[in-house]
Amino acid sequence: MMVRAGPLETLVKPLTTLGKVSDLKSGIANFYDESSELWENMWGEHMHHGYYPKGAPVKSNQQAQIDMIEETLKVAGVTQAKKMVDVGCGIGGSSRYISRKFGCTANGITLSPKQRPTSTAKNHALVW
């Protein structure tokens, strides 16, 4: 009986088989290169889940993603920023949101060569 690997297993090798950090980075980059378009089509410019508090009114996934950014900033006590870095920025949606909110510059870091042109093409204040 042949067992087929799922999408994640085919894009990112299990950690136990990776011998070098460069292999891990390459696997992660490959995963996002292959899946970014799907994520963007499903979720929009924010490639993360949203904030859905229990008992709150129903809202769109896009609003829940913005609410997640706002809740994270609140919990972290961030009320202003001049510069920021977004490690694992994806296509830069959250960086752009925070940059607009605070009027700050943003540096984005991604391992995915396919995500970088998207993030800079939609740039407001994203710097590489």
Image (cartoon, rainbow, N blue to C red):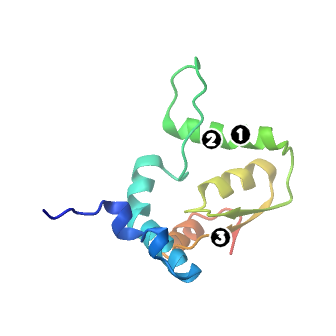
Residue at which label 2 appears: 66
Give me the C-alpha separation between circle 3 and circle 1.
Answer: 21 Å
Identify the amino acid type marked 1: Glu
Q: Position of residue 125 (x, y in %)?
A: 71, 64
Q: Position of residue 9 (x, y in %)?
A: 36, 65
Q: Is residue 69 above or below residue 6?
A: above
Residue appearing at x 51%, y 69% in the figure = 115
| Contact flag, marks 2 and 1 (Cβ < 8 Å) | yes
Q: Nearer the viewer, residue 38 or 32?
A: 32
As shown in the figure, which amino acid type bears the numbered disc 3?
Ile
The residue labelled by disc 1 is: 70
Q: Residue at x 62, y 62 (%)?
A: 89
Mark 2 vs mark 1, CA separation in Å: 6 Å
- Look at mark 3 in the image and give the residue it sits on: 109
The first of marks 2 and 3 along the sequence is: 2
- Callout 2 secondary element: helix
